[in-house]
Amino acid sequence: MKKSAPTLKDIARETGVHVSTVSRALNPSTRTSITDDVVKKIKNAAEQLGYRPNRVAAGLRTSRTMTVGLMIPDITNSIFPPILRGLESALEPMGYAVIMVNTDSLTSREHALVDVLRERGVDGIIHAAVLRDDPKIRAVAEDGTPLVTVNRRIENSGIPAVVNDDAMGVRLMLNHLYDKGHRRIAHIAGPVMLSTGEIRLRAFREIGVELGLDLPDQAIATADRFSEAEGERCAAALLDSGWNPTALLCANDRLALGAISVLRARGIACPEEVSVTGFNDMPFLDMIEPKLTTIRIQQFEVGRVSGETLLRMILDDNAEIAEVTTLPVTLVERDSVAPPPGHS
């Protein structure tokens, strides 16, 4: 005969405490009311007995599934694993598991997947794939689903967002290129329907004016996606414009890698003839040639802070949540920037 699974009553009998004490000790959100010694005793007994909590039954009692959805735009982008780990560092100690879905940066797929997550009963959603204006996601939040956007934000929505200081990142990089002697600096902008693309493009224009740079139309090419292929297309357009930039400031690392590929294919040395910079500092950039100068965002931290923010929303309907939490960025100097040709 199949052996029956151990229950809370079995653990209570083993430890000599009340069943309610066992229940609180095994729940990360309630165990703080019990001494550490008792919690340790109960957890050891549960492990020895082979106890496994029944999340389905618990969900029926609490109306929670202890799951959170994570929506990302591109599963091939290597900045998302550190963000996921940061998110898990906040959620796992509280007993939550993460269900990750990939939108492929397609609005129709994003809308279908957010419905799938809600049908699965997730307690909240971390969304890293939102557009600047997204009526569907606004409606999901207004309907009561706890929701936090990460890396991007929906403008004027009131939905909490954990983002990076995009404007400061552009300022740091433009100043760096300027100090190296560059005056003909072009920008490969990200998609303008994304907050990251729009904010970084606006900052490039505004700070370029502050520095007295000449920024004709030929100095900006706008990508349709954050991808290497779009970086190649935009870099080719800038090089063929006749304006002859000495530096390409790219809105993210993947665009920069595409730009470097075009330079290499055309026999243009980077950084000796044209410097290239990125944004995000995704993993492994220090293992390619030339090693990419970029802006480092706090990938793990942005995940952790977004997870903590979502937990507060789930556990306390009246929690005061900042609409925007902005994390600092830093400049990472590597090998892809040099003074322009002829500069002394």
Image (cartoon, rainbow, N blue to C red):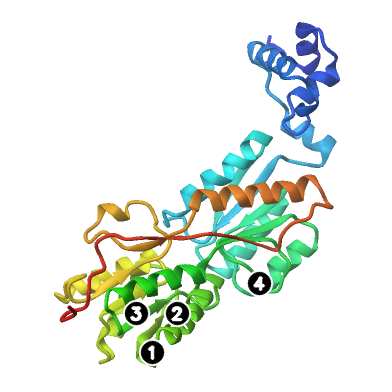
Residue mark closest to the camera, 4 vs 1? 1
Marked residue nearer the N-terminal end (3 or 2): 2
Query: What is the spatial separation of the Cα atoms under label 3 and label 4, in whole angstroms?
Result: 26 Å
Q: Comparing marks 3 and 2, which lies closer to the viewer?
A: 2
Q: Which label belongs to residue 204?
A: 2
Q: Which residue is mark 1?
A: 215
Q: Which of marks 3 and 1 precedes in the sequence? A: 1
Q: Return the x and y of residue 339 as percentages of the image width and height.
A: 22, 74
Q: Amino acid at mark 1?
A: Leu
Decide: marks 4, 1 in contact (CB < 8 A)? Answer: no
Q: Is residue 23 above or below residue 66?
A: above
Quadrant assignment for the C terminus: bottom left
Place of residue 178 in the rendered image (x, y in percent of width and height, measured from the top left): 33, 77
Q: Measured along the vertical axis of the image, is residue 5 above or below residue 229?
A: above
Instruction: Give the Cα separation between the discs numbered 2 and 4.
Output: 25 Å
Identity of the residue drawn at 58% across and 41% down: 88
Tell me the residue at 21%/70% (across/down): 271
| Quadrant position of residue 281 | bottom left
Horizontal side of residue 205 vs 115, given as left or right: left
Rounded to the nearest angstrom, the CA distance separating label 3 from label 2 is 16 Å
Q: Residue at coordinates 60% horizontally, 52% vertically from top-left?
A: 70
- Give the amino acid type for the residue marked by disc 4 in the picture: Asp
Q: Nearer the viewer, residue 6 or 342?
A: 342
The answer to whether residue 305 shows anywhere in this view is yes
In the picture of the structure, the residue carrying the numbered disc 3 is 234
Mark nearest the camera among 1 and 3 is 1
Mark sitting earlier along the chain (3/4) = 4
Say what secondary structure mark 2 lies in. helix
